[in-house]
Image: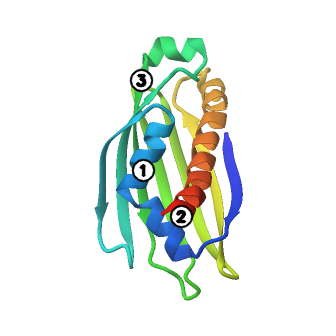
Amino acid sequence: MALSATTTLPHSVDSVAAVLVNEDFQRHVSQLVGGNLESFTVDGDVAGAFSATSVRTLPTTRLPEIARKFVGEHLKVTQVENWGAPEADGSRQSNISLKIAGAPVDVTAVQRLVADAGSTRVELEGEVKSSVPFLGGKIADAAEPMVAKALNLQAAQAQAWLESH
């Protein structure tokens, strides 16, 4: 199942990128959806290429009942973002992978922060896959809207965070 989202934030790429790799921001977004940020690490200098890894525990209350039977009341989600160094115009790209412990769903995505006249266009393209024979497509179809909502929530919260901090 394909993921695709684009939004524009009225802030520089540097500012948006800094928020996305801010541990306090990541904790805020996790708590906003009733979850908990268990760990957050950044490896490398954020001025160049680096990676960020977050591990969250999230409630499954918004999943369909059939999915909750398989995964329980909480999901442990590990998100790894491998960021490239800034391009000449300041734009950045991150390759994202999401692994959900106990769920046969994998998410891969590319997020670009594109410098656009003082603003940042956040572009996300990705894919949700499930390894379950015969049911994989249905599982991915069910997971895709939730993953898309989570990624869109992060962008909206980044704007609110930048305006309040």
Classify mark 1: residues with Cα within 10 Å, few (<14), some (14-19) or many (20+): many
Q: Give above or below for 10 relative to 53.
A: below
Depth check, mark 1 against mark 3: the one in front is: 1
Looking at the image, residue 81 lies above or below residue 92: above
Residue type, numbered disc 3: His
Q: Which residue is mark 3?
A: 74
Residue name at image x 65 percent, y 28 percent: 137
Q: How far apart in space, not on screen, are marks 1 and 2 (Cα)?
A: 13 Å
Q: CA distance from mark 1 to mark 3?
A: 18 Å
The residue carrying mark 2 is 162
Please give the name of the residue rendered at 42% of the width and 50% of the height, measured from the top-left corner. Answer: 26
Farthest front residue in view: 164
**In 3D space, how far apart are the residues under numbered discs 3 and 2 (Cα atoms)?**
29 Å
Q: Amino acid at mark 1?
A: Gln
Front-most of residues 162 and 54: 162
Numbered marks: total? 3
User: Percent position (x, y) of residue 24?
Assistant: 37, 53
Q: Could you say where residue 34 lies in the image, as x and y percent from the top left?
A: 46, 31
Residue placed most toward the observer, 7 or 87: 7
- Identity of the residue drawn at 43% across and 16% down: 72
Q: Secondary structure at mark 3?
A: strand
Q: Label 1: which residue?
A: 26
